Structure formats: C-alpha cells, structure tokens
Image (spheres, coloured by chain):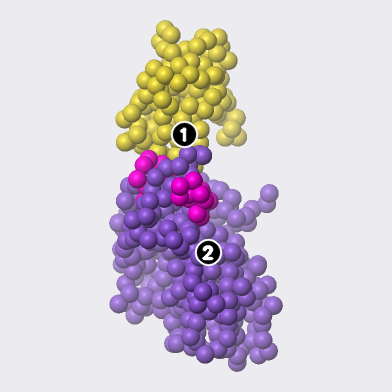
Amino acid sequence: MFLRQTPLYDMHLKYNGKMIDFGGWDLPVQFEGMGIIKEHNMVRESAGLFDVSHMGEVFITGEKAEDFLQSLVTNDIKVMKDLQILYSPMCYPDGGVVDDLLIYRYNNQKYLLVINAGNTDKDFAWIKQNLIDGVSAVNVSSEYAQLAIQGPRAQEILQKISDTDLDSIKFFWFNPSVKVSGIDCIISRTGYTGEDGFEVYVKSDDAAFLWEEILQAGGDLVAPIGLGARDTLRFEAKLPLYGQEIDQDITPLEAGLGFFVKLNKDEDFIGKSALIKQKETGLNRKLVEFEMLDKGIPRSHYDVQKEGKVIGHVTTGMHSPTFKKPLGLALISIEYSEPGTEIDIIIRDKPIKAVVGTGLFYKKQTKTK
Amino acid sequence: MNIPENLLYTDEHEWISVDGDTGRIGITDYAQHHLGDIVFVELPEVGESFAMRDAVGVIESVKAVVSLYTPASGTILEVNEELEDSPELLNEAPYDSWIAAIKLGDKNDLNKLMNAEAYAAFCQNLED
C-alpha cells in the first residue's frame, strides 16, 4: 500500500527511525539505539522532539465563525480570548464523538482547528456538511508540518533559538508569529505527554531545517521520539486517544470528559439534547482506571468480566514505563466503577484479577498557572 | 546481528542449545531487536509436554505480544523464573537468557532446524 510521508520523512531515515504504517502514514515507532522506554524516560526527564505533521489543520473564517463553532463543538467557544486555545469534543447528534480537537482563536472571525490525523477527511466532511452561511472552512493540513517539543527542558531548548520570550506563552495559549531560527512559526504551549512543552506549526518546506535546529540547540538534552513513546506518554497522563477512549459509540460523558461538555451554554450544539438526556437518566458505563492484582498486561479491546459476565472492555492498557507496572483504562458498567472493585481482565482467554482504582496515573507537569 | 555458531534456529527466531537429551530454548538477537523493550514473559509449567512448534509461552514488549514456539518436542524440565521479574534480560543478553529447558522428545526434530549460517542467510533475506 502507498504510505503518506510527512515533510520530516528524510529526517526519520537520517535518525534511524523504525518506520511503520500508522493509519496510512509512514512514521517512526521508535529510533535505533533508543527504543520506547528510553524515549519515554527522555521526555519525562529532559526533552523529546516529535513529528506530528500527520495531524490535520483546518481554518474556520468568516463573520459567523464563532457562532458556527459554538454549534459544532461541546465546549464553550464564547469564553475564549484572542490567542487562546480550547480543547473540545465534537459530537454526532446521538452524542457519539466525531473527534476531539484543539481550537486556536486568532479572533472571533478566524480559528484554527487541529484534528486527529486518521479523522482529517471525515472531520472536514462533517464540518462542510454543517457549515452555515458566512463561514468558510479550508483544510490546510498538507501545507503545515507540526513539531512537538515536550519535557521539563523543552522551554530552555526552544528559547535558545526563538525571538520571543516563551514565558509570554501560557498553557493553552499561542503566538502565531514567532521566529525560530529565522523561520515563521505558530507556537502553542500544548502537548500530548503530560509534560510542559510546545507544539510548533511551520510551513512544510521549513520543517526539516527546524527539526535540525531544535536538535542542535538541545544537544544531549533532546532526542527524536517515535509514536511508541507518544502513546505511552499520553496514556500515563490519561489523555484520551480517538478510537480507544472515545469514538463514535462512546460519548464524552462516558469517557470522563464532562468538563469539556457545556450543557448549560445558551446556544444549541450538535449532540446537546442526547447528552442532556444521558446526564439526566444517568450513565450506564464509565471510563475507569485499573491496575493488575495478578500477572499480565492488559491491552486495548481485551474484555473485562465480573463473575464470568462481560461488563466492558479495556480501552488502553500497557506496561507503564514510569511506574514500571501494567496499568489500564476500561469502559465498564457503572455498577462496577467504584474504586476498590475487583474485576477480571481476559488475557488469552484467562481471567486475570485487577482492581478499579483512582489516582493511579501520572500527575501532569504542565504549567497550568 | 549476533548469531552464535553452537546453536540451532527456527524461522520464528527461537534458538535451542543441545546437551545430551536436554535442550535450552530462547529467542534470538534478531527477535529481541524487532520486538523492542520486552516487559513480560509468560513461562510454561514444568512437566508440561509439547510437540515441535507448539506455543510454550508468551513474550510481550511495550507494543507487541508474540508466542514462543518450542523448536523441538519434549517435556519442560525447568523454566528461567528470573525472567518473570527481569524480562529485559531477553533484550540485554538474548543468548544467555534461556527461557525453558526441555527434555527432548524426538531428537530428529533438530534436523529440521537451521544452523547459524542458514539462519544468518534467513535473517538477511528478511531485511532485504
């Protein structure tokens, strides 16, 4: 099958990335001489550089841009200030999730949506389908590359080559005109690792140069990080992944994302009535944390049972590099969701004991103040 | 890629060392390299009997779950319990980290395995 390449493809080969097919993209799962655990620890302890150019970018512009987005997503667009960023699910009328996205507000007539790679075409079609007069949507995904530099040393590294004081970019804010090594960049203090860090949007042609500049500025403090560690890092920070914690058959309320669903906002939005109804009648199932009591590693889609009866499934499970033990997230019947409840994870047809918990995951180090 | 001369190999990247009627089995350098960081090993039970190429255990890396197939038939004599607490030994020293010792059932099984030279050519072919 033909795989799509990001503008950083040559860099992945140069740094000996082990390339895999990731939803149709040819991307590195890990790098030679590092591996997922070392890369993971590098980000937790120092800094890592990620190619996330496969993410989609859509500009929403026009007089009614704010009204349109307010009707499209579950979070409250109207509280946003210029240069602020909002995280939000985007739902179907039945409350299932189309995607989760970041919304960058330039002003109330211009927004940038950052959407999941695998959902880009579906999302863009959904946006077009619901578009109102006075608003236009432009998919610019192929024009932009996205680099993420994440970790406790990320700021000091990026600062060395930036013309702007990065302290001026607070958590979930952005600056659309920073020069990094002379290159025009959009920089936000956001990420998908649970660490402090930045996401840098740059025109595709400049991506490889910028990649090298950041690695050079960071020296031994930074290394290229593959998709394997991206997943272990986001999982430990309990950040949802579309297709696992959320999808078209899981509502944001079930996934524990109720904070990002503003049922009391004045305007109607797609999915609002279904979600209000779900809230009123009560959830049937819920996303929970669990850890293993007996030996075994839980994995996505494994069944969860209680006394031989299926009560749900593992959304993500793995060996946690930080805690050096298996951890999991599972979507299970609400009646078994209390911390301390024993459950069985079905691993290779055998029930392996686990227990629902709370506070098992990584405490985010993001600079929320 | 390290491929010791004194071992026999399978096309599933297991090795076996033979001493009289006893074989010790493990995974190759190629296998550990391609699996990545190994975080879990499920060992067989001592006394269990297996046919050649039966799955006798499971190896999990951060991303992958694979079965361990015995290169020869026989009965499990001993397992390397150290791997339960330190599965990373399979990455660090794949040929020193035997997984199970087996009392060989039919030594003719060994004739169906590859020697180091043939296995090296087999791996080279996979990489091309």
What tint does the image give chain A? purple
Identify the residue at horizontal 68%, vertical 72% (top origin). A125
Identify the residue at horizontal 64%, vertical 53% (top origin). A3
At label 1, the amino acid type is Val
* Residue A276 in picture, x, y percent from top left: 53, 79
- Chain letter corresponding to the colour yellow: B
Identify the residue at horizontal 48%, vertical 58% (top origin). A332
At label 2, the amino acid type is Ile
Extent of the magenta region: A291-312
Q: Is residue B79 visible?
A: yes
Q: Secondary structure at mark 1?
A: strand
Left or right of A367 in this view: A66:
right
For label 2, the residue is A246
Q: Toward the viewer: A100 or A289? A: A289
State the CA–CA distance, disc 1 to disc 2.
30 Å
Identify the residue at horizontal 46%, vertical 30% (top origin). B57
